Image: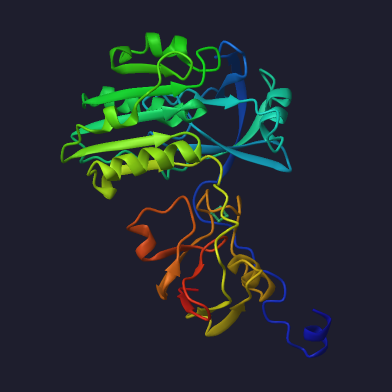
Amino acid sequence: HKRRISDGDTDNLVPQYKVPDGPPPVMIVTLKRRTACSGDKKIVKYEFASVDGSPLPSFDAGAHIDVTPVPQFIRQYSLCSDPADTSTYCIGVLREDAGRGGSTRLHKMLREGKPVLISRPRNHFPLAEEANKSILLAGGIGITPLIAMAHTLHAQGKEFVFYYKARTRAGAGFIDDLEHFPWADKVKLYFSDENRLDVNDVLHQYQRGNHLYTCGPAESMDAVFASAINLGWHEDALHREYFTAPDTSELESHPFRLTLKRSAVEIEVPTHKKATEALQEAGYPVNTKCSDGLCGVCATEYLKGDVDHRDFVLSKDQRKHKIILCCSRAAQANGDIVLDL
Ligand code: FES
């Protein structure tokens, strides 16, 4: 910065932030109710309502919100309430004592009647409208977005089955709710210490037009996808949502170049840096949030280039023209990715 200032080269030295168009991306809500919803009390349901009691912004099944219990912790949680009822947003949070601290802080800090900062809902895990039958397969706390999906499918009169597996009955969340939902007859429960779920049994009757949605631990979702593909499911019929990023440290990274078409600038990205970091240093900051390839905030249009997509959020179609800059790179060493920036 000192050298650039002494050279008089001050263009883009200070990032220019522009207030985005449209409604504000965050809002203050009130925690209306918190209820333990697993036998071991580790899963808690939080219901948020607007401060003045008016309806909250609408959302589609599969959407999530960011919750900020304290400024340095932002965590994403899927909405598990019925999208047809926007009087409240409901999330389910598992207290992970060995986690990064977000869930334990959330459990400690959120108190009924207190204000909470949340984002508007965003959705990277939507239902496919064309599905003639949906298989919802939830693992552990991954049940939350699938509950919202089941509400929507039930309201639409569409065919679906809801499989829920957990290690133990005591550690499973929402069991009472599942017994009382109007679609309770669609629910099949599996506990590792009672009756294990055989994924092949669930998936072997695939027929064209069926869609599978799964959410749970990464290794469990990988196994579900592997079985499905093995059994002939079409890739486009498989949907999953990660809530933590799988370990990608073993992936090989190369240096590459970003060409910013509209700015007519070339930026080198060394092996040890992310594209977002190189852009920031060059004076072209891109918004980021999770920096793990999960939230989609840094998605950017690209015009050309062979991209090694390492995100967990873009669909196959979106990857044809979008790149997640906090984790994806050029597929080849010294490759060039042309961005629409
Ligand atoms: S910042 Fe979340 S996907 Fe890049």
Residue drawn at 59 percent across, 14 percent down: 36
Q: Is residue 113 left or right of residue 228?
A: right
204 on left or right of 136? left
Residue located farthest toward the bottom when viewing the structure as drawn: 7
Whether residue 51 can be seen here: no
Q: Residue 129: give x, y in percent of width and height.
A: 24, 40
Quadrant hosting ligand 1 = bottom right
Up the image or down, 42 lies above or below 341; here it is: above
Residue ID at (20%, 41%): 130
Closest to the observer, 114 or 184: 184
Q: How many marks?
A: 0
Question: In the image as oriented, which residue stretches furthest toward the left?
Answer: 208
**Quarter-of-image position of residue 6:** bottom right
Is residue 259 visible in the rendered image? The answer is yes
131 lies left or right of 298: left
Residue 179 as seen in the image, left or right of residue 267: left
Residue 95 percent location from the top left of the image: 65, 25
Please provide percent x and percent y for residue 145.
43, 31
Taking the spot 50% from the left edge, 53% from the top edge, the residue there is 296
Seen in the picture, residue 5 relative to 74 is either above or below; the reply is below
Placement of 122 over or under 147, stated as above or below? below
